[in-house]
Image (spheres, rainbow, N blue to C red):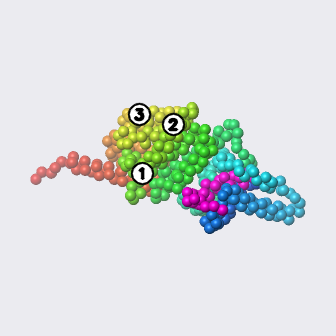
Amino acid sequence: MSGTGGEIGPEHLLRELAPQVLAAVIRRFRDFAAAEDAVQEALIAAAVRWPCEGVPDNPRGWLIQVASRRMTDHVRSETARRRRETAVALGMNEVIPPPDSETQAEQDDTLTLFFMCCHPALSSSSAIALTLRAVGGLTTAEIASAFLVPEATMAQRISRAKQSIKTSGVRFQLPTGEERAERLRSVLHVLYLIFNEGYTSSNGPHLQRVELSREAIRLTRSAHFLLPEDAETAGLLALMLLTDARRAARTGADGELVPLDKQDRTRWDRDAIFEGTALLTSALKKGATGQYQLQAAIAAVHDEALRQEDTDWKQILMLYELLKRMTDNPMVALNHAIAAAMVHGPRTGLELIKQLDADPRLAQHHRLDAVRGHLLEMAGDLHAAIEHYRFAAGRTTNIAERNYLMTRAARLDGVNHRARLVRAPKSSD
């Protein structure tokens, strides 16, 4: 046994190793649910023993060995139960016993596990939950807490996801050809959704769920390590780093939202910006440019501006125009309208977002009203801006965003009130 040398704590190491161990055990036994239970038992054993005994020289091998023993016991128990129930050896081929050779345990199947968790049979919410559980190593309680649902609800969601994978008959192997490209898009999309939920929470009292955005970055680093030549994987990691670099400046002392144009840019993480820019530069040299690379390029332009007035909005507008041609995403169109307003004036932006009023994907989304309110404020129509800020506040379920929008509406209402007082005729004696 040996210690960690003080560099990586056992808890961090266990989370990093969990997907590798689970993937190895699934490959050997072909049973997702039982393998996960066995790995969880191994992780618990490690959490209890390693702090006292020290981390083994081969921690991954130790965990695989312990989990495999649990699975072997499970296989024997299941086989004996079937024999007792049927009195014949039916089902012996349903569970594959461990191979004689241990050499396969050295293979890292994390990428295969990524693809399995993002199987087309799963909904986005199920894929996110299963990815966080199986690849991220988060407990069901941690995932439930992150998404503000009861633990029992999240446990059912994850259980259904595992059952969907089982009934789909998916084999534990890397997809090939077009299927791999399609599934990789799903993997990246799930990681993108996890990051977005962490960066701006869809509901609850806080603007951000830092643990989710950090986990998304960690998982995307893993994907990039496994696929170093894939430009879009690198682009997604760059996008996350360049966006997350602004995290510390996005909220004030009381957790209130601070918009981009009001942020203290000295609080931006320059190391993350440097790393993200380097990743993006390398990815763009590889040829085909995807949507994550373009989004990362937009984030990089924002991060390069040391002052709000230094922002190169013409370049951002050009990048959004390219992105609009690439994806039918209404949020891209909305951001394009903002960039157009910054270059050509608010009326141009307002005309562009009129086209989004009929899009059912944005019909009840608070961001459409929030952007319209912002552009109306820029145009000097304060009464209409107040109305749309209040509409937006009523539609968001994030308390920090709601408070910001209501504060903005109240501030404009105060400006309007003072203007009316100035315009009012003075009474004569």
Residue matched to label 3 = 314
* Residue that label 1 marks: 250
Q: Nearer the viewer, residue 288 or 313?
A: 288
> Which amino acid, mark 2?
Thr
Residue at screen point 48% across, 46% down: 272
Give the percent coordinates (x, y) of residue 50: 63, 64
Residue 426 is one of the magenta-drawn residues: no
Number of dots carrying numbers: 3
- Label whose residue precedes the other's in the sequence (3 or 2): 2
What is the C-alpha distance between the residues marked 3 and 1?
A: 24 Å
Along the polypeptide, which appears first: circle 3 or circle 1? Answer: 1
Looking at the rendered structure, the kind of residue marked 1 is: Arg
Which kind of residue does numbered mark 3 sit on?
Lys
Mark 3: secondary structure: helix
Q: Write down the region rendered in magenta.
A: 1-28
Residue that mark 2 sits on:
281
Q: Is residue 334 visible?
A: no
